Amino acid sequence: MNLVIYAPSPETYNRLLRRELEAVHFDLVLEIHRSAQSLAKRLRRPVADLVAAILFISGERQLLELLSFKDLLWDLPTILIMPDRNNRMIAQAHNLRPRFLTDSQKDCGREVLSVLNRMLDKSRVCSMTEIRGASEMNGSPVKH
């Protein structure tokens, strides 16, 4: 399972989440992207192995770049971390359809990890359902 992280400013990611993610989710492969172009290129490849995306927005320019390829994010559970509570930017950010939106002005690490854990649990349940369904279609017994 892979987790996509968009962090143009690594300081915010390092301060809020890096240690916790690496300690708690050692089974995840972290794909860290520093530019919107790199992220868009990754999202244009098959995303079946991606469980979620955490996007750190450091300003309006980054948000507008992400909005230019928002359709690539629609099927991917997304957590957005905004620089502050700017109402206009938050309204625009909702066009990315995040599952969770917070700001980096507070210590949001625990909240983000909690939401991510729920996303991972949901992903695991969906994967098991798909495996079970494929096995039943093939006539193979389902092993638990």
Image: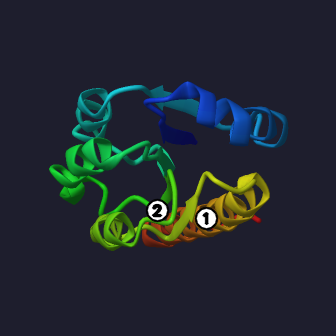
Q: Which mark is residue 119?
A: 1
Q: Residues within 10 Å of mark 1 (few under 14, many from 20)?
A: some
User: Where is residue 51 drawn, in percent x and y?
Assistant: 52, 52
Q: Quadrant of residue 131?
A: bottom right
Residue 91 visible from this viewpoint: yes
State the residue at coordinates (22%, 50%): 64
Q: Give the mark nearer the N terminus: 2 vs 1.
A: 2
* Quadrant housing the C terminus: bottom right
Q: Quadrant of residue 88?
A: bottom left
Q: Is residue 33 left or right of residue 17?
A: left
To which residue does mark 2 refer?
A: 77
Residue 27 visible from this viewpoint: no
Q: Residues within 10 Å of mark 2 (few under 14, many from 20)?
A: some
Q: Nearer the viewer, residue 27 or 64?
A: 64
State the residue at coordinates (50%, 38%): 5
* Quadrant housing the N terminus: top right
**Residue type, label 1:** Met
Give above or below for 39 relative to 64.
above
The answer to whether mark 2 and mark 1 are in CB contact below 8 A is: yes
SS class, disc 1: helix
Q: Which mark is residue 34?
A: none
Q: Quadrant of residue 111?
A: bottom right
Q: Is residue 121 left or right of residue 38?
A: right
**Farthest residue toward the left?**
68
SS class, disc 2: loop
State the residue at coordinates (65%, 59%): 116
Give above or below for 57 relative to 123.
above
**Residue type, label 2:** Pro
